[in-house]
Structures are given as structure tokens and as C-alpha cells.
């Protein structure tokens, strides 16, 4: 029982980590939490559904195309809901993002299905469970873990070895100084938002066969990703990964040992507990305030 | 722009017109205007937190629901009389609001936003799953309250109660924002650091703003449950929150009278779109976004700018000064 819960917790934790990484990447460079992040995740799921199920594009190609389309959608979000308000108070930014998220949700409902429609999505490797002793695994869970690890490695390589990745780090460190050395800060912001959306999209396509696709998935995923980011220490990328895995495991343990319906609210409990006990999370530094 | 009278005159006239309205209205119109009055309470309360305090929270819709459920359940489960249930519901909601906000308000605004978003989902979960108490997803019916010694039907009684509460709470908010508390909130909104340097206790005033808005939401919920005679979880989801955000933003962040205006306009829009349920999310989301980008001060800014007597200074006009009320400060 315990081993099974741990393994499936780690599998869903991988996805939360991936979504949380997207959230934190945007936060680090723009100090804004993208409240439309969950809806970008949801739309990516529907992109993949349209490509893979309706148009019969192979899974991996559909994944790639959905990630690219979401990258573009992320940049569009930046253009519509962030750039015009860059110098406005944070409240305006959050309100605009919330408005945009409802536009996306409404559109998804119009295009793909209404309330309560859970649209099934076929898995990559068939659906016969694999059994190791007492652990029962769905093949898609292995795909999820593998895919997440690959994405994380790509992310790390991108930030460490590419010029664009380095300009992003520089901008996150100090936007003014980055501008002084000739980095186009606005372009970096747009790329960052696209990158965040792409991470969410990868998670969405990996996850779709396990949870199905539906328009209301966004908000609950955003809250879980935030719980992951807070638990890890907001603003820390390794923290977001650690936090995501922990949220996945905690959720499974709560669901397995206490009550299944507790899975839905463990994110809330985690956020409140972290706020009360240790607001800086596992790896967070005490934040400096910008004056 | 021709003058339509000072704000006090317009609001007074509106109050009288609304007081006489039940004499001519049909039940549907009475219900819609009653809903509008409840939205006024919600929007004014949310604006205290969002527009004046600059604190972003998603809790208002959930607190609205908690107020409605508490009032309804006290009547149905414990047979409390309506007015007592209203008072208890509002106090209970305020307490819950305080419990949620207290840890989050000590950190950056981001935490309040996210903790309250999670709280909104948690509330939905409780309403759906704690069936022994809340009746679950189907909701429950509440007997229409009676106002016995008064010669009023239930709907009329609720209407007058809502009108009275809305007027009182709007005036209360108008006085709060021009008091020490209101000035402290605006100072915090404009710069937390500067406010702290002026010896304003951030956590304390943020908590005051949050508790006030929770109280307003609780009262609004109590009135709402009696207006509909029915409560169900889906009335208090995040879409309800977006409607409330839109009311405050369209009317004008940081303007009590803007919220009154916004509540009326958005209610009209919601009723107009009732037939196109699928379009509502898109319409309200788009409206919220466009208004934030292109009209950040809301519709009230036109009135404030062009109408004598409509400016909203953050202090009471100086009695000794003979300067006109909207002279440049």
C-alpha cells in the first residue's frame, strides 16, 4: 500500500513540479504570478486532444505541436495581460490575468465541451497495468516520469548553456542592469511567459491520458502548482521540483490513508500549513523588498 | 457636461425611488433590483479591500456563500428566526474570514491571493462533500422569512431589508474611507514601505480591511439566501468572484459610489446575458481585462472629473474652509 501510494504520488508530483516550474520561471523574471497559468495548461490539453484524437496526429508529434502552440499562447498572454500593465499595480496585473483566464475557459467550453464533460484521451503505451510485487503502475505513469525528467534536463541545459537562457537569468537578476548591457528585456519577458506556458503544456499532454481533459481543470491545477512552489520556497526552481513531488506524495497519502476526497483539498492545507509554520518553504530565501 | 445634481442629491433621490419601487414593480423586477442591492453590498465591501487597501483576495465569493449557507442552515436545521440568523451568519463569516487571512496577511500580497484562491476551492469542497450539514451538491430550500407585524409580503420584506442594509453599509463605507482607517488603507495600497515608515501597522490595517469585506460579504450572503429561498454550491464559485471583480473594476477601484454604479451595471449585463450562459464567462472575463487596461479608474472617473460635487476626497471637507469642495488640493 505505502509503496504503491508513494510511486503514484511521485508520478503526479512530477506533473505538479512541471507546472510549478512554469509558474516560478515567470515569477522570477517578472515578479508576477500568472493567474492564467492553469488555463494555459487546460488549453494545451485541448490542443493535444484536437491534434491526437480528432486529427489522428501521432502522440509525440501532437505533444510537440501542443507545446509549440502553447508557447505562442503564453507569449500572447504576456502581450495582452502583462505588457500593457507592466508599470501598473500588482492588483491590475492579477485582475487582467484572471479576466484572461476566464476568457480562455469560456472559449474552451464553447469549442470543446461544457461543464461536466470529461473528454477521454488515449495513453501512449496502452492501458494494461504493470505489476511489480504490490505496486501496480499504469504505463502512462512511467511516460509521465520519463517525460518530466527529460523536460527538467532540457530546462536546466537551456538555462546553463544557451545565450537566451543566460539573458533570462540576467533579466531575472536585475532587469535594469540587463537593459544596460543591451538585453531586450521586453523580448525576454515574452519568451519567459512562452516558456512557462510550454512547461505547463508538456505537463498537460503527459497528464491528459491519466486525468482526461476538461475546462475546469485549470484552477485546481494552478492551486496545486502554487502549493508546490510555496512548499519549495517561492522563487526557487529546485524548490518547485521538490515541492511538486512532495505535494503529489502528500496528496496520495492523505487520499489513501484518510479519505479519498481529501486529495482535492490537500493543496489548501499545505499552503496554509506552510504559511503558518515556515513561510519560506524548504529552499526559499527571505525575500528582499523592492522599494 | 450638464450637472445632474450633487452626489448626495442623486443618491438621496435614488434611495427614495428604490423605496417606492415595490409599489409599481412586478415580482421579477423586484427580485432583480433586490439582487442589485445585494451586489451593491458585495461590491462596496470588496472595494474596501481591493480598491482602498490594495489587497488581492479571491475569498469574497466563498465568504458570500458561507454567509448564505450559515443563515440558511441556522433557519432550516435549528429553526432560528430569520433576523437572528442573518446576524449570526454575518458574524460567523467574519470569523472565518479572519482565520483565513491572518496567516496570509503577514506576508506579501501574493500569499493572500493564493491562500484565498485555495480557500475558495476548499469552501466549494466543504459545501459539496459535508452532506450531513450542507445537503451537498443539490443545495437546499429555505422557507421564505416572514415579517409579521409589518404588512409586507416576504419578497417585499426582504427587499426593504436589503435596501436598508445596502444604504447603511454604503454610507458606513463612505465614512470609513474618510476616517483614519481609510487613509491608512490608501497609504498601504500606494506604498507599504512608506506606510510602515509612517508608523502604520500593516498587518493590523490589512486585517481590518479583510474583516470588513468579509462582514459585508456575510451580510450579502444572508440577504441572498432569503431572496432566492434556495442555496447551492455553484452560486459561489470563482465565476461569481469574477463578476464581483468586474463590478468593482468597472465602477471604479477605490470609489464607494463607483461600486454602487458598477453593481447596477453588471447586474443588468448578467440579466441580459442570462439566455446565453456560455457567453457569460467570456464576456465578463473580457470586460474585466479591457477595463483594467483601458479604463483603470472605472466609469466613476468620468463623473469625478466632470461633475461638481462628485469628487471623493479622502478627508472630510474642512468646515472652516470656504474653498469649493472640488478645488485642487
Image (cartoon, grey):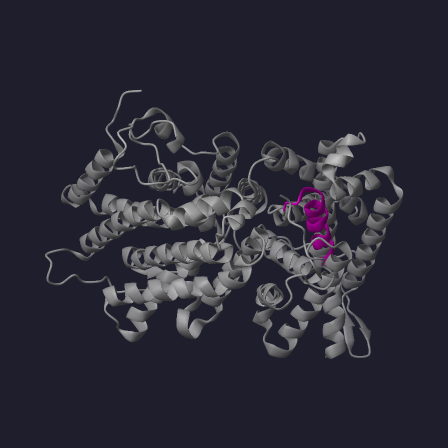
Q: Position of residue A120 (x, y in %)?
A: 65, 55
Please, which residue is most extreme toward the right here?
A161
Left or right of B240 in this view: A166: right
Number of marks in the image?
A: 0
In magenta segment, residue A258: no
- Residue B236 in view (yes/no): no
**Viewer-proximal residue, A282 or A144?**
A282
**Viewer-proximal residue, B271 or A152?**
A152
Q: Is residue B191 above or below residue B92?
A: above
**Viewer-proximal residue, A202 or A138?**
A202
Q: Position of residue A143 (x, y in %)?
A: 80, 59
Please, which residue is most extreme toward the front here?
B320
Q: Position of residue A270 (x, y in %)?
A: 62, 66
**Which quadrant: the N terminus of chain B?**
top left
**Magenta region: which residues?**
A17-32
**Viewer-proximal residue, B122 or A95?**
A95
Residue drawn 29% across and 28% down?
B323
**Which quadrant: the C terminus of chain B?**
top left
Left or right of B75 in this view: A218: right
- Corner quadrant of residue B8: top left
Left or right of A225 in this view: B68: left
- Residue B310 in view (yes/no): yes
Q: Is residue A214 above or below residue B89?
A: above
Q: Position of residue A67 (x, y in %)?
A: 75, 43
In magenta segment, residue A27: yes
Q: Is residue A245 above or below residue A195?
A: below
Main structural element of the magenta stretch: helix, strand or loop? helix
Residue drawn 38% across and 46% down?
B43
Amino acid at each position: 500500500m505505502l509503496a504503491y501510494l508513494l510511486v503514484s504520488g511521485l508520478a503526479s508530483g512530477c506533473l505538479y513540479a512541471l507546472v510549478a516550474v512554469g509558474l516560478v520561471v515567470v515569477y522570477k523574471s517578472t515578479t508576477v504570478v500568472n493567474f492564467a497559468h492553469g488555463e494555459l495548461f487546460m488549453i494545451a490539453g485541448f490542443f493535444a486532444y484536437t491534434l491526437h484524437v480528432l486529427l489522428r496526429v501521432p502522440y509525440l508529434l501532437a505533444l510537440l505541436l501542443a507545446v509549440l502552440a502553447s508557447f505562442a499562447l503564453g507569449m500572447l498572454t504576456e502581450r495582452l495581460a502583462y505588457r500593457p500593465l507592466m508599470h501598473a499595480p500588482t492588483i491590475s496585473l492579477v485582475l487582467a490575468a484572471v479576466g484572461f483566464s476566464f476568457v480562455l475557459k469560456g472559449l474552451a467550453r464553447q469549442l470543446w465541451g461544457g461543464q461536466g464533460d470529461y473528454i477521454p484521451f488515449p495513453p501512449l503505451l496502452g492501458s494494461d497495468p504493470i505489476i511489480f510485487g504490490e505496486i501496480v503502475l499504469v504505463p502512462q505513469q512511467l511516460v509521465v516520469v520519463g517525460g518530466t525528467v527529460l523536460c527538467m534536463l532540457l530546462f536546466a541545459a537551456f538555462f546553463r548553456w544557451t545565450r537566451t537562457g543566460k539573458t533570462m537569468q540576467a533579466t531575472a537578476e536585475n532587469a535594469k542592469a540587463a537593459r544596460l548591457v543591451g538585453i531586450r528585456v521586453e523580448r525576454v519577458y515574452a519568451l519567459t511567459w512562452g516558456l512557462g506556458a510550454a512547461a505547463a503544456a508538456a505537463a498537460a499532454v503527459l497528464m491528459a491520458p491519466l486525468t482526461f481533459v476538461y475546462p475546469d481543470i485549470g484552477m485546481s491545477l494552478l492551486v496545486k502548482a502554487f502549493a508546490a512552489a510555496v512548499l519549495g520556497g517561492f522563487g526557487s526552481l529546485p524548490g518547485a521540483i521538490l515541492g511538486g513531488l512532495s505535494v503529489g506524495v502528500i496528496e496520495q497519502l492523505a487520499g489513501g490513508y484518510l479519505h479519498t476526497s481529501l486529495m482535492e483539498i490537500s493543496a489548501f492545507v499545505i499552503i496554509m500549513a506552510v504559511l503558518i509554520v515556515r513561510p519560506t518553504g524548504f529552499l526559499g530565501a527571505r525575500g528582499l523588498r523592492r522599494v | 457636461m450638464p450637472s445632474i445634481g450633487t452626489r448626495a442629491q442623486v443618491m438621496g433621490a435614488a434611495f427614495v425611488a428604490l423605496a417606492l419601487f415595490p409599489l409599481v414593480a412586478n415580482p421579477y423586477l423586484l427580485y432583480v433590483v433586490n439582487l442589485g442591492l445585494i451586489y451593491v453590498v458585495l461590491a462596496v465591501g470588496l472595494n474596501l479591500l481591493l480598491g482602498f487597501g490594495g489587497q488581492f483576495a479571491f475569498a469574497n465569493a466563498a465568504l458570500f456563500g458561507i454567509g448564505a449557507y450559515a443563515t440558511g442552515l441556522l433557519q432550516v436545521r435549528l429553526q432560528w428566526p430569520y433576523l437572528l440568523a442573518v446576524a449570526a451568519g454575518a458574524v460567523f463569516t467574519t470569523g472565518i474570514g479572519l482565520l483565513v487571512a491572518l496567516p496570509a496577511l503577514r506576508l506579501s500580497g501574493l500569499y493572500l491571493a493564493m491562500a484565498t484562491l485555495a480557500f475558495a476551492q476548499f469552501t466549494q469542497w466543504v459545501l459539496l462533500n459535508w452532506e450531513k450539514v450542507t445537503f451537498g451538491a443539490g443545495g437546499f430550500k429555505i422557507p421564505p422569512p416572514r415579517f409579521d407585524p409589518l404588512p409586507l409580503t416576504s419578497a417585499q420584506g426582504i427587499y426593504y431589508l436589503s435596501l436598508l442594509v445596502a444604504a447603511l453599509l454604503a454610507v458606513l463605507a463612505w465614512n470609513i474611507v474618510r476616517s483614519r482607517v481609510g487613509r491608512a488603507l490608501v497609504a498601504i495600497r500606494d506604498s507599504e514601505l512608506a506606510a510602515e515608515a509612517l508608523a502604520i501597522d500593516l498587518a493590523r490595517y490589512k486585517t481590518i480591511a479583510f474583516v470588513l469585506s468579509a462582514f459585508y460579504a456575510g451580510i450579502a450572503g444572508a440577504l441572498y439566501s432569503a431572496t432566492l429561498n434556495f442555496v447551492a454550491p455553484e452560486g459561489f464559485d470563482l465565476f461569481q468572484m469574477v463578476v464581483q471583480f468586474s463590478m468593482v473594476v468597472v465602477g471604479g477601484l477605490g470609489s464607494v459610489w463607483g461600486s454602487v454604479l458598477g453593481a447596477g451595471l453588471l447586474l443588468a449585463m448578467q440579466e441580459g446575458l442570462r439566455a446565453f450562459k456560455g457567453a457569460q464567462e467570456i464576456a465578463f472575463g473580457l470586460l474585466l481585462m479591457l477595463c483594467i487596461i483601458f479604463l483603470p479608474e472605472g466609469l466613476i472617473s468620468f463623473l469625478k472629473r466632470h461633475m461638481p460635487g462628485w469628487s471623493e476626497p479622502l478627508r472630510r471637507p474642512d468646515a472652516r474652509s470656504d474653498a469649493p469642495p472640488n478645488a485642487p488640493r
